[in-house]
Amino acid sequence: MSDLSKNSPTTVGSEFARGLAATFPLMVSAIPFGVIFGTLATNAGLSPLAVMSMSVFVFSGSAQFIAILLLGTGSALGVIWLATLILNLRHLLYAATLVDHVRHLSQTWRFGLAAMLTDETFAVMERRYREEGGGPNAHWYYLASCLGMYLNWQFWTYIGIVLGTEFPEVKNWGLEFAMIVTFTGIVVPALRSAPFWAAAVVAGVVATLGNFLPYKLGLMLGALAGILVGLGLQEWKRRKTGIAGETA
Amino acid sequence: MSATEITLMIAGMALINLAIRWPVYLFADHVRFPPLVERALAFVPVAVLTAIIVPATLYPDADQGIQLSYMNPYLVGAVVAAVVSWKWKKLMPTILIGMAVFFVTRWMVGV
């Protein structure tokens, strides 16, 4: 019975459906983000084609927002590229975290799953692999999450372009709060032991103290400090219990 | 910026993103992380996402200082969302209740 329930959800169709279902709340919360991006970018003077191209080819909400912000301040191309690089370096860590589960796939699959890797899909997949492990068709779960986020982002960018032309004040509605509340809903359940609490507290404090730094460097410093402190505490606990186990 | 520069900006951003996201998967057959690094990677989601949300909550306006106050709708909404998430561990109620509290607080504060 338990074997059956373990094996039954591994068909391509059910993996795809479950990946989409797990990603659905994140797609909903990305709606205001996409709309605001479309609105802001349009009001910053970009053509609808340029705004759409950004969502289609860059597909990174945070980098797209920073680019619009920097465009507004008359920044040079190099500055915008540097900001994109620093801001999205976290995706390298995401890929490193998930790579064990995509190693067996073809290069075509790996390319697609890498190109569409976002904060949201990473959160969905990290949880799935942690709770259920892999499975012969787990990559369909991953693909569903990617495609859901991707198509959702394109659609709501487009709506934002339309709205931005009609109602430029949409950008003052505070809809970007959706991102904060979504990430809160991902982080809190992940605080499963003292080292994770330590990582969160340190990351939050350091990022806040570093908020004045350019190009969101505070974010990178905060994340690094959080990872190091969390890991340090965990290793210290392991060593302590390890020694206790030897003497017992 | 000219249309050419905008095109360059977008192409450059797209390439940079790909250069960050793709190599680890591309060279997956040759990439093996030591166990210590793998244990460190488990802290990535918590550390990165917290580093994004805490400053965004405490500094909702780029041109203002820290807003550690119940008059800050971002802070009130985020704290309530954290409590809801802790209690029920469900994403959708966390998002909906958090957004609702945010908008009500914003309306009451009158920003």
Image: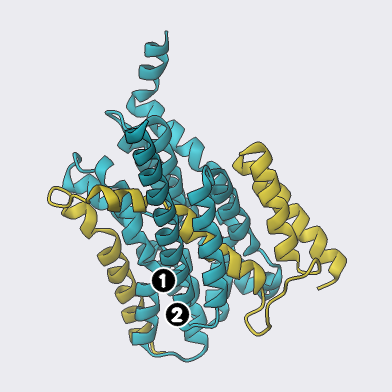
Query: Relative to residue B25, is residue B6 depicted above or below?
Result: below
The furthest residue to the front: A247
Crowd band around label 2 with a 10 angstrom C-alpha radius: few (<14), some (14–19), many (20+)? some
User: In which quadrant will I find the N terminus of chain A?
Assistant: top left
Mark with earlier residue (2, 1): 1
User: Residue at (34%, 48%) from the top-left corner?
Assistant: B39
Task: Write down the colour of chain B.
Answer: yellow
Check chain identity for marks 2 and 1: say if they share one. yes
Quarter where residue A36 is shown? bottom right
Mark pair 2, 1: CA separation: 7 Å
User: Residue at (62%, 81%) from the top-left corner?
Assistant: B62
Q: Is residue B10 left or right of residue B85?
A: left
Labels 2 & 1 near each other (Cβ < 8 A): yes
Residue A213: horizontal and vertical position, in percent?
49, 82
Q: Secondary structure at mark 1?
A: helix
Residue A224: horizontal and vertical position, in percent?
41, 65
**Tag 2: amino acid:** Tyr
Q: Which residue is mark 2?
A: A215
Residue A178: horizontal and vertical position, in percent?
62, 58
Chain that appears cyan: A
Q: Is residue A75 left or right of residue B21?
A: right
The furthest residue to the top: A1
User: Residue at (60%, 65%) from the top-left corner?
Assistant: B54
- For residue A87, which numbered disc appears in the image? 1
User: In which quadrant will I find the C terminus of chain A?
Assistant: top left
Q: Secondary structure at mark 2?
A: helix
